[in-house]
Amino acid sequence: MKDSAPPRSVWARSSRLVRLAAGLAQKEVRGRIGRATAPDALGVAVSRLRVQVEQAREVVESLGQLKGAAMKAGQLLSMELVDVLPPEVIDVLQKLQDSGPAVTWEEIHSILEAELGPERMKSLTVEQAPLASASIGQVHRAVWTRPDGQRVDVVLKVQFRGIAETIDSDLALLERIARAFLAVQMKNIDLGAVFVELRAVLVRETDYLQEADSVERYRRLAHEVPGLRVPEVYREISTRRVIALSHEPGLKLSAFLATEPTRAERERVAHQLLDLYFREFFSWGLVQTDANFANFLFRPGTQELVLLDFGATRAYDEAFRASYRELLLRCFEGDFAATLSEAESLGLIDPRESEASRRALFDLITSVLSVFREHRQPLDFLDKRIVTESGERLRGYYAGLERSAPPAQLLFLHRKLGGTFSMGKALGARIDLTPFWRRLEQAKVASASRAARESDADVAEGSA
C-alpha cells in the first residue's frame, strides 16, 4: 500500500504548494483563452465553470495530501466562499470538510507506540480501520483495559507526524500566495493579523493536552444544559499527540435525517444547535468554533446532542463580547455612527476605508440581522432570500475594500455561526428567533449588572 502520510519537510510541502499555485494560474489562462474563442454566452459560461471545477479538484487533491495548516486553509476556503463560487465547485471543496486520505495503520501504530510506550500500548486494543481522517489527525476506536481491569470503549485521536512542526512554514507560504492574489486585484490588505490568529488556532489544535483542558472545561459548563453530551477525557492514555476520549454513540446528521424525523424533531435539534451557539459566546465565552457536520452526533431516543471535537475551542473575554454585542444592538436600532465605531474597534473595517465601504458594511450587518425582525418569524432556514440578500451585500462590501482584512478574532466565530446556520438549513427548520434576540439583549443587562457589582466590590475593598 502506498504511504499516505503527509510530507513533513519544508521543501516537500513548499514545492507542492508552489506547484499548486502555478497549476491553477495555467488553468485560468487556458480558461480565458477558451472563453475568448467561445461562440456564445452559454459557451463562455460552460468554459468558466469547467475551469473552476478543475481548479477546485486540484486544490482538494493537493491540500488533502498535505493535511495540516494547508488543508485547514482549504476547509476555510470552502466555507467562506460558499455563496460566491458555483455549487459544483463548492461540492468539490467541501470534501475537505468531511475527511482527507487516510494514513496507513502502520504509520498510526508507529505514532501510538512512540507516544504511549509499550506498557500503555498493552492495555489498548485498537481497531485498524479509522473512524475518520482529517487535516490534523486520524481517529480510531479502541478498548482500554484500565489498571483495575475495567474495559472501556474509547476513541483515540492520533496526530500525524510533523504537523505541528510545519505550521509556520505552511502558513508563511500560504500567506505569500494570498498576498500575490491580492496584489493582482490591486488590494492593499494586510493579512498579518489573520494569519496570526490562524497560527494560534492551529497551535492549540496540535496540542492535545490543551484540547483535553478545553474538553474538561466545556464539559463542566455543559453539565448545566439538559440534552447536551460531552465526552470524558482519559488522561492516563493521553499525550500531546494522542488524546483518548469516551466513545459516544449517536447518529451523524445525514443518518439522523435518513430516519425521516418529523418536523418537530428536526426543529428541536435545530433549536438545540442555536441555543448552544448563544450559550457558548454570549454566556460562557468559550466556543467550539468548528461547526463541521461530522463534529455532532444526534440521539433521537434521549434527545441528546453530542459534541465530538474540541481542538478549535476558543475563549472570548467579556470586553470583546460586550463590544460585539453592542455592535449588533446598535445596528439593529439603525445607529450608523455607533455601529461603525464598534466595527472599527473590533477590526471589522479599517478606518481609512471610504464612506461608501463603511455604508456597505452597515448595510451588510443590517441585512444579516434582518433574520431577527418580527415580520420574518418564524424564520425559514430554507428561504433562499437569506443567503441571496446577504451574499449580494457581502460581495458589494468586499468589492469596494482596499485595506480591510477579514476580522481576525471573528474568523472562527463566524465559521461556527455559518456552520450552525448550515445545519439548520439541512434540517429544514422554521424557528422563531425572537427569544434568541431577547437573550442577547438580556446578556447586555446581565453584563452591566455584573460589572456594577465588581465595581462596588472594588470600591468597598479600597475603603476598607
Image: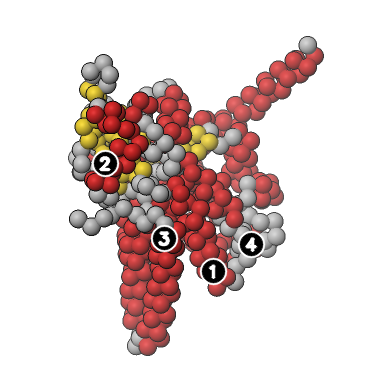
Mark 1 Cα-neighbour bin, 10 Å: few <14, some 14–19, many ≥20 = few
Residue kind at label 1, given as amino acid type: Ala
Question: Looking at the picture, how far across and down is residue 341, in whole percent?
Answer: 69, 48
Say which label, 3 or 1, has the lower sequence index: 3
Q: Earlier in the sequence, mark 4 or mark 3?
A: 3
Element marked by disc 2: helix
Q: Amino acid at mark 3?
A: Arg
Q: Which disc number belongs to residue 13? A: 3
The image quarter containing residue 149 is: top left
* Residue 118 disc label: none
Q: What mark, if any, has residue 403 been given in the picture?
A: 4
If the image is split into quadrants, where does the N terminus sit?
Answer: bottom left
**Residue at the (36%, 31%) spot, across then down:** 238
Q: Which mark is on residue 109?
A: 2
Q: Residue at x 54, y 69 (%)?
A: 180
Image quadrant for the C terminus? top right
> Which tag, 1 or 4, sits closer to the chain's start?
1
Q: Earlier in the sequence, mark 2 or mark 1?
A: 2
Q: Are marks 3 and 1 in contact (CB under 8 Å)?
A: no
Q: Are marks 2 and 1 in contact (CB under 8 Å)?
A: no
Mark 2 vs mark 1, foreground winner is: 2
Q: Is 201 positioned to the left or the right of 138 in the image?
A: right
Amino acid type, callout 2:
His
Which numbered disc, 4 or 3, marks the residue closer to the eye? 3
Measure the alpha-carbon separation of dots 2 and 1.
Answer: 40 Å
Q: Residue at x 57, y 70 (%)?
A: 183
The span from disc 2 to disc 3 (Cα, nearest Å) is: 24 Å
